[in-house]
Image: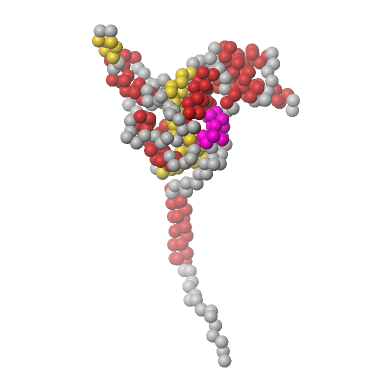
Amino acid sequence: MEMESDEVDLPNYSVTPELALLIARGNDLLTRLDAWLPPVPPRIDWRDTWACRWRKHAGNGMLMPVTTLNCPPWAALSAVDEQKSALDRNMRQFIKGLPANNVLLAGSRGCGKSSLIKALLPRHAKKGLRLVEVDRDDLIDLPEITARLENQPFSFILFADDLSFESGDAAYKPLKAALDGSVAGLPANVLICATSNRRHLMPEFYAENLETQHLGSEVRPGESTEEKISLSDRFGLILTFYPFDQDAYLAIVENWIVALGGASAEATRSEALQWAIQRGGRSGRVAQQFARDWVGRQGLKHR
């Protein structure tokens, strides 16, 4: 007696040239579509991720982890002791869940504004501090960004670097609303820290002074001036930075040389001053750049 087999004979479908061409065109179309589709947002584990950037693709925003941090040592930042003290105290209040202010660091370029914000991260990361960098043009996404952070058991800095707005630019309105204007305030675990070379974040023109009214001994600024001041005034803590004099500049150079593992010599002073003349000014950035060059050159001599 023959045993019945469980195997089923499948029909033999042959791929015609027309079908093969159709499949190839379909695969090509899918490949092209993949380039337009937004990437899959990475899952952020904030226990291991200290910082993220907010990035947009085809109109969709996502948090992208920063794998290589650019955070200077807190101790390497000198000649800005008052600003450091006020910023650090405000940040410790924030991390401990106490009332704290949003921060604006404004003033001369290259004087350590951005460096101070970034240096806070390694200083307080073990206490739960995290940082999210947001570009100026993406400030409109602040409600979406904060919604993704408010339920996390960490304290977040929303960092907007080199912030400025041109006359007639409406991009500042989302920031203005987030700071103090919207019925939905910032989550308790989110603090905005911004840097700018402009004290009021917007350009100021001489013609605006003509709008000022003098009523007896009272001076009333014009509407244009009031509008600009109303944005910066919403930052509770404003720290101002000024150009460094020669002694402060040289002290910063010395501090950076030590931080980079070098040792200064008698020629350091004159070379540092010559470097500043060539760069057109004395600033913390110029001092750091000279220190890198000096330590690097000294290292080459011993290798």
Q: Quadrant of the N terminus?
A: bottom right
Q: Residue furthest top?
A: 216
Residue 121 falls inside the magenta stretch: yes
Residue 167 to residue 24: above or below: above
Compare residues 235 and 21 and report the one nearer the observer. Answer: 235
Q: Measured from the top left, where is residue 248 in percent x and y?
A: 57, 14
Please give left or right for residue 275 compared with residue 227 in the image.
right
Residue under the image location 44 percent in, 32 percent down: 191
Q: Measured from the top left, where is residue 78 in percent x and y?
A: 57, 19
The magenta-colored residue range is 118-130
Residue 143 to residue 78: above or below: below
Q: In terms of secondary structure, what is the magenta stretch mainly?
A: helix
Q: How was this image coloured? A: secondary structure
Please give left or right for residue 39 compared with residue 271 in the image.
left
Compare residues 216 and 139 and report the one nearer the observer. Answer: 216
The answer to whether residue 291 shows anywhere in this view is no
Q: Quadrant of the C terminus?
A: top right
Residue under the image location 41 percent in, 24 percent down: 236
Residue 188: which quarter of the image? top left
Q: Measured from the top left, where is residue 42 in percent x and y?
A: 50, 46
Residue 102 to residue 28: above or below: above
Residue 260: which quarter of the image? top right
